[in-house]
Amino acid sequence: MVRAVVIGVGSMGRNHARVYAELDEAQLVAVADVNRSLCEQVASHFGARAYTDYVAMIEKEKPDVASIVVPTCEHLAVAREVMERGVHVMVEKPIASTLAEGQEMIRLSEVYGVKLSVGHIERFNPAIIELKRRLDDGQLGRVFEIHARRLGPFPSRIRDVGVVIDLATHDLDIMRCLVKAPVERVYAETERRIHTEHEDLLLGLLKFADGTLGILDINWLTPTKIRELIVIGERGMFIANYLTQELQFYENNHVGVEAQWSSMAVLRGVSEGNMIKY
């Protein structure tokens, strides 16, 4: 049984607490937050103990793992205190505000012999898991382009970073997961339209070593929330919807596709002409 604690119980921290409480393999023993009232409320809800001092919590509870769900600018300082005490770390993405801070967290994990994991949860989205399986099986043929759209309204809870660090990290992680080649070139434009301190719009173009192109369309300016990944290749196009966790395939009419596509329709849905829903 893994003994877990959560540091920071805002909106995402409560999710970490909930998941630990639901896992058979884990026990949520305590949570910590500078907001005493909120901390006690979350602790009571999940049957854990509440602390306003996370260092005192670590030293008293002696957990196996700690989720760090505090503002990004505080990740390094909190992670250092936790790892110095021999506790494994799950840190919310982004790993840090700067490259240097992220590299220092990695170095500390190696020095203290603890695991450091970053919450890139989109890798575990069912639509992405299925998409990766089909791409690995070669069902799309050669991949030409991956286009990420992560759009939505401005989130009032984000104050310390912009869309590049807060949102685009998800899509960069997924692209690196799907494309088995390093990024060779990057061109990007950012703008600050509403956010007073950080960029709230990113348009980026990536060139991978195998020739695949990646497009990033990320903003906090769109009135509706869109989370979508489009992969275009020789045999057609996949569209993965992160929100509905659905995967669709659109077949290229001019490309001969094996009979396996018609049989695949039974996996989740129905064949609609040249489109298959999973």
Image (cartoon, helix red, strand yellow):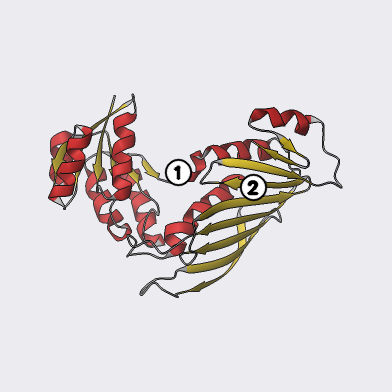
- In the structure shown, which secondary structural element does the residue marked by tag 2 occupy? strand
Q: Which residue is mark 1?
A: 121
In-image side of 161 versus 210 (left or right) = left
The one of 142 and 201 positioned closer to us in this rendering: 201
Q: How many marks?
A: 2
Q: Quadrant of residue 246?
A: top right
- Residue 28 higher or lower than 223, as above or below: above
Given residues 15 and 198, the one toward you in this image is: 15
Left or right of 99 in this view: 52 = left
Please tell me in which quadrant of the rendered image residue 267 appears: top right
Q: Residues within 10 Å of mark 2 (few under 14, many from 20)?
A: many
Would you say residue 68 is visible in this rendering?
no
Please identify the quadrant where the C terminus is shown. Answer: top right
Q: Which image quarter: residue 51?
A: top left
Spot occupied by residue 12 in the image (x, y as percentages of width and height): 33, 48
Residue 120 visible in this rendered orientation of the protein: yes
- Kind of residue at badge 2: Ile
Give the residue displayed 84% in from the left and 46% down from the top: 253
Question: At which x and y percent is residue 95?
Answer: 38, 53
Mark toward the viewer: 2 or 1: 2
Disc sitting over residue 239 in the figure:
2
List x then y, in percent, for residue 197: 36, 73
Mark 1 lies on a secondary structure that is helix
Relative depth, front residue between 84 and 11: 11
Classify 10 Å Cα crowding around label 1: few (below 14), some (14-19), many (20 and above).
few
- Decide: is 89 above or below 95: above
Q: Residue at x 41, y 64 (%)?
A: 154
- The numbered mark, 2 or 1, whose residue comes first in the sequence reads 1
Circles 2 and 1: CB distance less than 8 Å?
A: no
Q: Amino acid at mark 1?
A: Ile
Q: Position of residue 215 (x, y in %)?
A: 62, 60
